[in-house]
Image: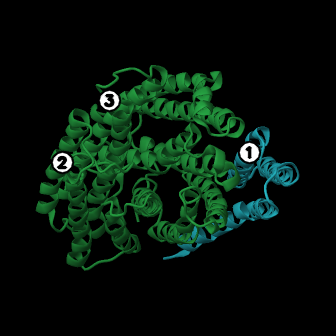
């Protein structure tokens, strides 16, 4: 059914109603992430702020962990949204999925409360189990990590079970089902088991690079394939061909690209060559993606019945190229990375790459859901443009500011100062660094304003506008 | 690597990929709207990318192996947009000719 003939009151599948709950939770947590991002940025301007009440490390934990959780929730929601549409039936294990959603929400609230109110504990097993595991990105205590494994298992059952019950498999579903294996298995690296710092970091990077980057990248690839069919009417054969190419590239360059995280953690020297070589290959497929984005946008002459989703999809392709391609390539070779790693330069790359690769994509799915729920034949107007413009402006401004600050750190603190504590302090007092931190705060506020506009636009009742003549026909 | 070379090398690496992206974007737009001027502008971007790769090879303190890799990357950049475009046209053409 094309979107211009979609009746407003057509009932949703239960899994799609559940997806809406996931989107709501995800967008709320997106806001929490921004609040703690702003707070973390403020510490750089006022270092003694909230000293011994809410320290910088707690705020940063909230900012980063909530990022992981809200994106994970959005992915789960997106899959639940498209699963019945793709396989033509209600999702298997829907009741378990509904229960899991509330368990997920309660667990997130409990972990957040623990981080904010308890913050840290003694060096004991109790702390690992109930307060904080002490591993960046996955600080959540062990009980919560086990909970995430259980949630991912239920999610896997939902996907696989629906395929089995529908007796139907598409190319997209094959890729998604196979991706569920690393999605569950690699997450098990969240449980610390090694007291050797180098060995521990070696596996921890599997979690960060393989799980959050490679596995998620394939998952968002599947989701975007479904979105492209939905929003732009791209044929199944075309999106599946590109999905297979993406999987090949992830397997070919992405997995050993992991090596760029192994430069300075005590691993053998050959990782310098492996990591540098495969990371240098990573911009090549992104260049192909730029051409593809231009082709798709042009072929549809920028016409679509869901303008916000279309623009966010385009932003994803370009954001991924700039954030991962340009920003990543600047600092990926070991000779440069020696100076840049762990500075705001890395933070700049991380913000841009995550935003381009994931955030833009999941916002596009939310607009797809919004159009379906409201039943408007043409989703356009001006309000969404404020969200789109301010979020993108805020992000570009933040990453430019962070790049400036990070280069100052690498230049003054590392290359000139020799990475001593005094050099770090001197670099932190440098005017370039401080200017970058102020600019980051300013653009962070712009980003927050964009978030408010986005939420307002997602929640308000859309005005009905006539559908365009050439509505996309999903394959 | 001295401090100035660090920033210079990093900036050149970023500009290399940016010029490559400019090539891909302009080449695609030029082919899409049948505007040879845009295609030529895209090709100029590739020339710029290759010039940047040469600059990296000549001016920066990277080891020879990395310099060769970057030069080879810049050469591969030349092929990617036309090859991708042909692939897309064939894929879409096949799709349209299917019953």
Q: Residues within 10 Å of mark 1 (few under 14, many from 20)?
A: many
The quadrant the C terminus of chain A occupies is bottom left
Q: Give SS at disc 3.
A: helix
Question: Which chain is painted in cyan?
Answer: B
Q: Position of residue A160 (x, y in %)?
A: 26, 73
Q: Nearer the viewer, residue A201 or A105?
A: A201
Q: Chain of mark 1?
A: B
Tell me which residue sits at (61%, 66%) in the image.
A271
> Which residue is situated farthest in the right direction here?
B58
Question: Which chain is painted in green?
Answer: A
Residue A473 appears in view: no
Please state if A83 lies on the left or on the right of A404 as rendered: left
Q: Quadrant of residue A439?
A: top right
Q: Give SS at disc 2.
A: helix
Q: Quadrant of residue A449?
A: top left
Earlier residue among tags 3 and 2 = 2
Q: Which residue is identified by label 3? A: A456
Q: Position of residue A467 (x, y in %)?
A: 40, 43
Mark on residue B15? 1
Q: Position of residue A460 (x, y in %)?
A: 28, 31
Number of residue marks:
3
Q: Are marks 3 and 1 in contact (CB under 8 Å)?
A: no
Q: CA distance from mark 2 to mark 1?
A: 45 Å
A241 above or below A107? below
Q: Nearer the viewer, residue A146 or A216?
A: A146
Q: CA distance from mark 3 to mark 1?
A: 38 Å
| Colour mapping used in the image | by chain
Q: Chain of mark 3?
A: A
Q: Which residue is identified by label 2? A: A107
Q: Position of residue A391 (x, y in %)?
A: 46, 33
């Amino acid at each position: 059914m094309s979107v211009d003939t979609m009746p407003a009151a057509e009932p949703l599948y239960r899994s799609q109603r559940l997806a809406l709950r996931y989107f709501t939770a995800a967008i709320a947590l997106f806001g929490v992430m921004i609040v703690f991002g702003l707070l973390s940025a403020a510490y750089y301007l006022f270092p003694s702020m909230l000293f011994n009440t809410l320290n910088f490390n707690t705020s940063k934990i909230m900012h980063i962990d909530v990022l992981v959780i809200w994106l994970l929730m959005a992915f789960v929601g997106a899959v639940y949204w498209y699963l019945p549409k793709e396989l033509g039936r209600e999702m298997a294990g829907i009741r378990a999925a509904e229960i899991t959603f509330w368990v997920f929400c309660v667990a997130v609230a409990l972990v957040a409360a623990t981080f904010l109110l308890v913050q840290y504990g003694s060096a004991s097993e109790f702390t690992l189990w109930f307060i904080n595991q002490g591993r960046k990105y996955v600080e959540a205590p062990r009980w919560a990590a086990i909970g995430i494994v259980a949630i991912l298992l239920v999610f896997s059952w939902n996907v696989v079970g629906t395929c089995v019950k529908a007796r139907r498999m598409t190319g997209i579903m094959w890729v998604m089902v196979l991706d569920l294996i690393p999605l569950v298995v690699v997450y098990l690296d969240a449980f610390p088991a090694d007291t050797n710092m180098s060995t521990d970091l070696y596996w921890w990077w599997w979690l960060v690079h393989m799980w959050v980057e490679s596995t998620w990248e394939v998952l968002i690839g599947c989701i975007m394939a479904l979105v492209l069919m939905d929003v732009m009417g791209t044929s199944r054969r075309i999106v599946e061909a590109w999905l297979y190419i993406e999987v090949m590239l992830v397997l070919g360059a992405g997995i050993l690209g992991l090596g760029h995280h192994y430069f300075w953690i005590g691993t053998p020297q050959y990782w310098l060559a492996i990591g540098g070589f495969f990371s240098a290959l990573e911009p090549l497929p992104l260049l192909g993606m730029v051409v593809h984005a231009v082709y798709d946008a042009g072929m549809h002459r920028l016409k679509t019945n869901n303008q916000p989703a279309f623009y966010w999809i385009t932003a994803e392709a370009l954001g991924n190229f700039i954030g991962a391609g340009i920003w990543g390539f600047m600092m990926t070779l070991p000779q440069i990375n020696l100076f840049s790693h762990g500075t705001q330069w890395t933070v700049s790359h991380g913000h841009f790459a995550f935003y381009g690769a994931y955030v833009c994509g999941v916002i596009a799915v939310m607009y797809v859901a919004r159009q379906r729920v409201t039943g408007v034949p043409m989703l356009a107007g001006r309000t969404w443009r404020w969200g789109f413009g301010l979020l993108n402006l805020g992000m570009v401004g933040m990453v430019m500011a962070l790049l400036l600050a990070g280069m100052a750190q690498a230049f003054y603190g590392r290359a000139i100062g020799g990475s001593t504590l005094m050099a770090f302090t001197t670099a932190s007092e440098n005017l370039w660094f401080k200017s970058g931190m102020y600019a980051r705060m300013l653009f962070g506020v712009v980003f927050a304003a964009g978030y408010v506009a986005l939420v307002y636009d997602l929640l308000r009742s859309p005005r009905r506008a006539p559908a365009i003549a050439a509505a996309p026909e999903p394959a | 690597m001295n401090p100035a070379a660090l920033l210079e090398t990093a900036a050149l690496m970023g500009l290399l990929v940016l010029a490559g992206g400019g090539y891909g974007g302009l080449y695609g737009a030029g082919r899409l709207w049948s505007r040879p001027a845009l295609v030529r502008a895209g090709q100029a971007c590739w020339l710029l990318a290759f010039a940047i790769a040469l600059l990296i090879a000549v001016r920066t303190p990277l080891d020879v192996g990395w310099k060769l890799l970057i030069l080879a990357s810049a050469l591969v950049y030349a092929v990617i947009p036309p090859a991708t475009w042909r692939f897309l046209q064939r894929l879409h053409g096949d799709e349209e000719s299917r019953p």
